[in-house]
Amino acid sequence: MTAVDVGLLLIRLVLGVTMLLHAWNHWFGGGRIDGTAGWFEGLGLRPGRVHAWSSVAAEVAAGAGLVLGLLTPFACAAVIGTMAVAGVVAHRRNGFFVFRDGYEYVLMIAVVGAAVSLTGPGRVSLDHALDILVRGGLGCAIAVGAGLGGTALLLATSWRPKPESPPVDG
Protein backbone atom coordinates (compact mmCIF):
# COMPACT_ATOMS: atom_id res chain seq x y z
CA MET A 1 0.00 0.00 0.00
CA THR A 2 1.35 3.40 -1.00
CA ALA A 3 0.67 6.95 0.14
CA VAL A 4 -1.49 7.37 -2.99
CA ASP A 5 -3.61 4.38 -1.91
CA VAL A 6 -4.09 5.91 1.55
CA GLY A 7 -4.95 9.27 -0.01
CA LEU A 8 -7.53 7.67 -2.32
CA LEU A 9 -8.99 5.77 0.63
CA LEU A 10 -9.37 9.02 2.61
CA ILE A 11 -11.01 10.78 -0.33
CA ARG A 12 -13.36 7.83 -0.93
CA LEU A 13 -14.29 7.60 2.75
CA VAL A 14 -15.05 11.31 3.11
CA LEU A 15 -16.99 11.47 -0.16
CA GLY A 16 -18.82 8.21 0.58
CA VAL A 17 -19.79 9.16 4.11
CA THR A 18 -20.90 12.59 2.84
CA MET A 19 -23.24 10.91 0.36
CA LEU A 20 -24.55 8.53 3.04
CA LEU A 21 -25.25 11.51 5.31
CA HIS A 22 -27.11 13.24 2.47
CA ALA A 23 -29.24 10.10 2.12
CA TRP A 24 -29.82 9.97 5.88
CA ASN A 25 -30.91 13.61 5.91
CA HIS A 26 -33.29 13.15 2.98
CA TRP A 27 -34.80 10.07 4.63
CA PHE A 28 -34.80 10.90 8.34
CA GLY A 29 -33.87 14.56 8.78
CA GLY A 30 -36.24 17.45 9.41
CA GLY A 31 -39.47 16.60 7.67
CA ARG A 32 -38.29 13.05 6.89
CA ILE A 33 -39.06 11.63 3.45
CA ASP A 34 -42.34 13.59 3.21
CA GLY A 35 -40.50 16.85 3.85
CA THR A 36 -37.91 15.98 1.21
CA ALA A 37 -40.71 15.12 -1.21
CA GLY A 38 -42.38 18.48 -0.59
CA TRP A 39 -39.08 20.31 -1.03
CA PHE A 40 -38.41 18.49 -4.30
CA GLU A 41 -41.94 19.31 -5.52
CA GLY A 42 -41.27 22.96 -4.70
CA LEU A 43 -38.11 22.80 -6.81
CA GLY A 44 -40.15 21.43 -9.71
CA LEU A 45 -39.19 17.74 -9.43
CA ARG A 46 -42.42 15.85 -9.91
CA PRO A 47 -43.57 13.57 -8.44
CA GLY A 48 -41.66 14.66 -5.36
CA ARG A 49 -42.02 11.42 -3.43
CA VAL A 50 -40.54 9.36 -6.27
CA HIS A 51 -37.61 11.74 -6.52
CA ALA A 52 -37.10 11.78 -2.76
CA TRP A 53 -36.80 7.99 -2.65
CA SER A 54 -34.70 7.95 -5.84
CA SER A 55 -32.35 10.48 -4.28
CA VAL A 56 -32.00 8.37 -1.14
CA ALA A 57 -31.32 5.24 -3.20
CA ALA A 58 -28.73 6.97 -5.39
CA GLU A 59 -26.97 8.53 -2.41
CA VAL A 60 -26.87 5.24 -0.47
CA ALA A 61 -25.53 3.39 -3.54
CA ALA A 62 -22.93 6.10 -4.16
CA GLY A 63 -21.87 6.29 -0.53
CA ALA A 64 -21.65 2.56 0.05
CA GLY A 65 -19.85 2.00 -3.25
CA LEU A 66 -17.27 4.66 -2.43
CA VAL A 67 -16.71 3.53 1.16
CA LEU A 68 -16.20 -0.06 -0.01
CA GLY A 69 -14.41 0.89 -3.22
CA LEU A 70 -16.86 -1.30 -5.13
CA LEU A 71 -17.99 -0.60 -8.69
CA THR A 72 -16.32 2.76 -8.28
CA PRO A 73 -17.17 4.31 -11.68
CA PHE A 74 -20.87 3.62 -11.05
CA ALA A 75 -20.71 5.01 -7.51
CA CYS A 76 -19.04 8.11 -8.96
CA ALA A 77 -21.75 8.33 -11.62
CA ALA A 78 -24.36 8.50 -8.85
CA VAL A 79 -22.37 11.26 -7.12
CA ILE A 80 -22.00 13.26 -10.34
CA GLY A 81 -25.65 12.83 -11.31
CA THR A 82 -27.01 13.70 -7.88
CA MET A 83 -24.86 16.81 -7.62
CA ALA A 84 -25.59 17.89 -11.20
CA VAL A 85 -29.34 17.71 -10.55
CA ALA A 86 -28.93 19.66 -7.31
CA GLY A 87 -26.79 22.23 -9.10
CA VAL A 88 -29.33 22.81 -11.84
CA VAL A 89 -32.57 22.75 -9.85
CA ALA A 90 -31.50 24.33 -6.55
CA HIS A 91 -28.22 26.25 -6.82
CA ARG A 92 -27.49 27.48 -10.36
CA ARG A 93 -29.61 30.61 -10.14
CA ASN A 94 -27.82 31.69 -6.93
CA GLY A 95 -24.37 32.08 -8.47
CA PHE A 96 -21.14 30.37 -7.46
CA PHE A 97 -20.61 30.89 -3.73
CA VAL A 98 -21.95 28.36 -1.23
CA PHE A 99 -22.63 31.08 1.36
CA ARG A 100 -25.22 32.45 -1.09
CA ASP A 101 -26.63 28.94 -1.69
CA GLY A 102 -24.72 28.81 -4.98
CA TYR A 103 -23.35 25.79 -6.81
CA GLU A 104 -19.80 25.86 -5.37
CA TYR A 105 -20.34 22.88 -3.02
CA VAL A 106 -22.16 20.62 -5.48
CA LEU A 107 -19.59 21.40 -8.18
CA MET A 108 -16.74 20.45 -5.82
CA ILE A 109 -18.43 17.18 -4.82
CA ALA A 110 -19.13 16.28 -8.47
CA VAL A 111 -15.56 17.05 -9.56
CA VAL A 112 -14.14 14.95 -6.71
CA GLY A 113 -16.40 12.12 -7.91
CA ALA A 114 -15.07 12.53 -11.45
CA ALA A 115 -11.48 12.57 -10.17
CA VAL A 116 -11.99 9.34 -8.20
CA SER A 117 -13.45 7.70 -11.30
CA LEU A 118 -10.34 8.77 -13.21
CA THR A 119 -7.79 7.55 -10.63
CA GLY A 120 -9.70 4.46 -9.59
CA PRO A 121 -10.30 3.50 -5.96
CA GLY A 122 -6.74 2.45 -5.09
CA ARG A 123 -5.50 -0.81 -3.61
CA VAL A 124 -7.57 -0.55 -0.42
CA SER A 125 -10.83 -1.37 -2.19
CA LEU A 126 -13.07 -4.26 -3.12
CA ASP A 127 -12.56 -3.36 -6.78
CA HIS A 128 -8.85 -4.07 -6.34
CA ALA A 129 -9.46 -7.26 -4.33
CA LEU A 130 -11.95 -8.55 -6.92
CA ASP A 131 -9.78 -7.43 -9.85
CA ILE A 132 -12.43 -4.99 -11.11
CA LEU A 133 -10.03 -2.40 -12.44
CA VAL A 134 -11.90 0.19 -14.46
CA ARG A 135 -10.12 3.53 -14.21
CA GLY A 136 -8.50 6.16 -16.35
CA GLY A 137 -10.38 7.41 -19.37
CA LEU A 138 -12.85 4.51 -19.37
CA GLY A 139 -13.70 4.88 -15.67
CA CYS A 140 -14.16 8.61 -16.06
CA ALA A 141 -16.20 8.22 -19.27
CA ILE A 142 -18.52 5.77 -17.50
CA ALA A 143 -18.95 8.02 -14.47
CA VAL A 144 -19.34 11.33 -16.27
CA GLY A 145 -21.39 9.84 -19.12
CA ALA A 146 -23.80 7.95 -16.87
CA GLY A 147 -23.98 10.76 -14.31
CA LEU A 148 -24.69 13.55 -16.78
CA GLY A 149 -26.80 11.29 -19.00
CA GLY A 150 -28.98 10.40 -16.02
CA THR A 151 -29.18 14.07 -15.10
CA ALA A 152 -30.32 15.04 -18.59
CA LEU A 153 -32.92 12.27 -18.64
CA LEU A 154 -34.29 13.20 -15.23
CA LEU A 155 -34.48 16.91 -16.05
CA ALA A 156 -36.11 16.26 -19.43
CA THR A 157 -38.77 13.95 -18.03
CA SER A 158 -39.44 15.23 -14.52
CA TRP A 159 -38.33 18.81 -13.92
CA ARG A 160 -41.21 21.22 -14.26
CA PRO A 161 -40.34 24.39 -12.34
CA LYS A 162 -43.01 26.99 -11.84
CA PRO A 163 -42.51 29.95 -14.16
CA GLU A 164 -41.16 32.99 -12.41
CA SER A 165 -43.62 35.84 -12.11
CA PRO A 166 -42.82 38.78 -14.37
CA PRO A 167 -41.97 42.01 -12.58
CA VAL A 168 -44.96 44.23 -11.92
CA ASP A 169 -44.71 47.63 -13.59
CA GLY A 170 -45.67 50.41 -11.26
Image (cartoon, rainbow, N blue to C red):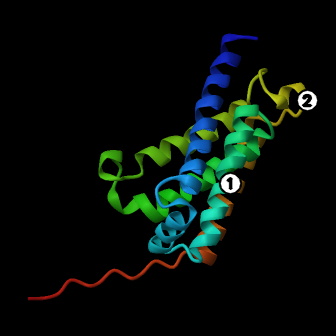
131 shown above or below 77:
above
Question: The residue tagged with tag 1: helix, strand or loop?
Answer: helix
Disc 1 residue crowd, few under 14, some 14–19, many 20+, Cα 10 Å: many
Q: How many marks?
A: 2
Which amino acid type is marked by label 1? Ala
Q: In this figure, which residue is indicated by the disc labeled 2?
A: 131
Q: Which residue occupies the foreground of this view, 35 or 155?
A: 35
For mark 2, does the 10 Å Cα neighbourhood hold few (<14), some (14 to 19), or many (20 or more) residues? few
Pick the front one: 54 or 32 = 32
Q: Residue 162: x percent and y percent?
A: 42, 81
Q: Is residue 147 visible?
A: no
Quadrant (top left/top right/bottom left/bottom right) for the C terminus: bottom left
Instruction: Pinpoint residue 97: horizontal percent, then vertical percent.
Output: 33, 47
Q: Which mark is residue 156?
A: none
Q: Nearer the viewer, mark 2 or mark 1?
A: 1
* Amino acid beneath label 2: Asp
Q: What's the mark number on residue 58? A: 1
| Disc 2 to disc 1: CB gap under 8 Å | no
Q: Is residue 141 above or below residue 44?
A: above
Percent position of residue 74, x then y: 75, 47
Q: Is residue 94 left or right of residue 53?
A: left
Q: Could you tell me which secondary element the residue under label 2 belongs to?
A: loop
Up the image or down, 43 lies above or below 1; here it is below
Residue that protrudes farthest toward the right in the picture: 130
Please name the residue shown 61% across and 67% down the image: 51
Residue sitting nearer the eye, 12 or 47: 47
Q: Residue 152's spot in the image, x, y percent?
A: 62, 66
Q: Residue 151 versus residue 63: which sits nearer the camera?
A: 63
Is residue 80 shown to the viewer in this render?
yes
Question: Residue drawn at (57%, 77%), measured in percent from left and top?
Answer: 46
